[in-house]
Amino acid sequence: MTDFFAKLYQAAHAAGLDAGKSAMPIPMVFEGGVPGQKKTTYVVEDGPCGLVTIKLHSASNFAKFLIANKIAKKGFDWRVANIFVYDFGQSLVRQEAYADAFVAVLKNAGIEKVFVSSHID
């Protein structure tokens, strides 16, 4: 079973990487500066910054495999296993694309208790 889980993770991770690389974030433009001085315009090419987490039921054998292999961490309430998406820096759009593709692979393999959580920093 461990070999199956390893291959499943590798397939999900590969799909996520492809999706994240293919994502097309809209650049975020903002102005800032010191009051009374000329404003400076900043452009963040990868769009909004944020954090994305893939969450799955920690009692599943797949989640136990991920936790044992330090791919996922148990949540604070111990019922959830969290995979923090660290690829693609802080690009929320690229991280969400990665997570959505990752979750699609898991759902296609019959793992239903899995979802994506994200927030803007």
Image: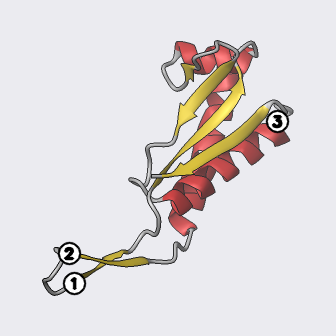
State the CA–CA distance, disc 3 to disc 1.
52 Å
Residue at figure coordinates x 82%, y 36% from the top left: 109
Nearest the eye: 43 or 86: 43
Picture disc at residue 33: 2
Residue receiving disc 1: 39
Residue type marked 1: Lys
State which quadrant residue 43 falls in: bottom left
Q: Is residue 49 above or below residue 65?
A: below
Residue type marked 3: Ala
The label nearer to you, 3 versus 1, is 1
Horizontal and vertical percent position of residue 112:
85, 33
Residue at figure coordinates x 72%, y 43% from the top left: 103
Residue at figure coordinates x 59%, y 20% from the top left: 75
State which quadrant residue 32 falls in: bottom left
Nearest the eye: 42 or 107: 42
State the CA–CA distance, disc 3 to disc 2.
50 Å
Residue type marked 2: Gly
Nearest the eye: 7 or 67: 67
Left or right of 90 on screen, residue 26: right
Label 1 environment density (alpha carbons within 10 Å; few <14, some 14–19, many ≥20): few
Mark 2 residue element: loop
Left or right of 114 on screen, residue 81: left
Label 3 environment density (alpha carbons within 10 Å; few <14, some 14–19, many ≥20): few
Left or right of 59 on screen, residue 88: left
Q: Is residue 64 above or below residue 119?
A: above
- Which tag, 2 or 1, sits closer to the chain's start? 2
The answer to whether marks 2 and 1 mark residues whose Cβ atoms lie closer than 8 Å is yes
Residue at figure coordinates x 51%, y 42% from the top left: 85
Residue receiving disc 3: 109
State which quadrant residue 35 falls in: bottom left
Residue found farthest to the left: 37
- Which tag, 3 or 2, sits closer to the chain's start? 2
